[in-house]
Image (cartoon, helix red, strand yellow):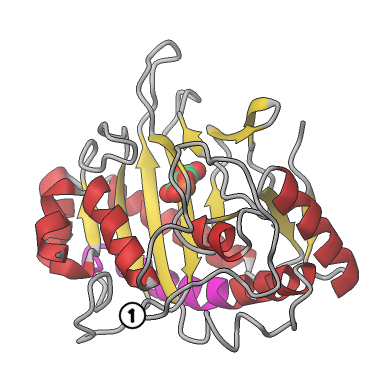
Amino acid sequence: MSLPIIDLTAPMVVKAAAIERACRDSGFFYVTGHSVPADLVRRLDASAREFFALPEHTKAEIAMERGGKAWRGFFPVGAELTSGRPDRKEGIYFGTERPGDPRPLHGGNLFPEQVPALKVAVLEYLDRLTATAQDVLRAVAVSLGLDEDYFAGGYTADPTVLFRIFHYPPSEPDADDWGVGEHTDYGLLTLLLQDGNGGLQVRTTDGWVDAPPVDGTFVCNIGDMLDRLTGGWYRSTPHRVRNVSGNERLSYPFFFDPDFDREVPPLPSVSHGSGPRWDGQDLRAFTGTYGDYLVRKVSKVFPHLGTELE
Ligand SMILES: O=C(O)CCC(=O)C(=O)O
Ligand SMILES: [Fe+2]
């Protein structure tokens, strides 16, 4: 089984039909025909590699602990526990640049002064990917029989945008460690840029399948909130990463999520039921805002930051 490639320049009815098929099937697809310049991707990649090559103590100058409850900055290998055990990766967390915003997971970003090009590339990338995600969501809305601007005029009029850059050191082929343990994403859509090394796996009805890098594309997958909104009609699918390429792997997941302060009740048009989810969690059971859901999840993957987020 291979994941479909959806061209964003195709007519809306064509895109919407392809998205419905993909979201009903594996919840994963590739996006091409986007307007993110290749040169921006190159600058982002080059400056990120420059950052990760810095000595540990220099990287620690922008350690996540210094970002407080904004949950921004650098974390070293082993500090994040995606599925209850330490991941074999290090990374930097970013989000929409909003200095002074006191809400958890909001605020100003921490950028390394040693690599000024990273700040320029990240801020530009956040803008470009926000537009790309709104574009994909328009087709998702149509695929659900909703008005094209259903999300942009509501849940994502003021979206929660988080962006991470991960560096996965190579794993031994027979090791049982994971760069990122099995998980689903929390929000609406993830747009993932990955380098040429591969390592991402998606759990489908046929078992685990690879989502190898395809030049010029993003891997797009839907998250828990789209699963919840659609009552499980679109499934938020488990995935994981192990880097056995023998090389340093870099990846750039961009998370496009609902307004932090909004509740996300199931869509009125949705009546489809679904069986139990992979981890037994009932996404319809929680009450509260998207922010409540996200903070609860984040406190689990970064236990030492959890108390700050309460
Ligand atoms: O690094 C990757 O390829 C995927 C990362 C991921 O699944 C995540 O951060 O949610
Ligand atoms: Fe993920």
Q: Is residue 190 visible?
A: no
Q: Where residue 95 sits in the image (x, y, percent)?
A: 36, 71
Residue at x 24% of width, y 38% of height? 77
Q: Main secondary structure of the magenta part?
A: helix
Q: In this orientation, which residue lies closer to the viewer: 202 or 21?
A: 21
Q: Is residue 54 visible?
A: yes
Please, is residue 208 above or below residue 263 in the view?
Answer: above
Would you say residue 133 sits in the magenta stretch?
no
Mark 1 is on which residue type? Glu
Q: Quadrant of the C terminus?
A: bottom left
Q: Is residue 37 left or right of residue 96?
A: right
Location of mark 1 (residue): 97
How many discs mark residues in the rendered view? Answer: 1
Residue at x 68% of width, y 85% of height? 149
Please, is residue 112 above or below residue 75 in the view?
Answer: below
Would you say residue 113 sits in the magenta stretch?
yes
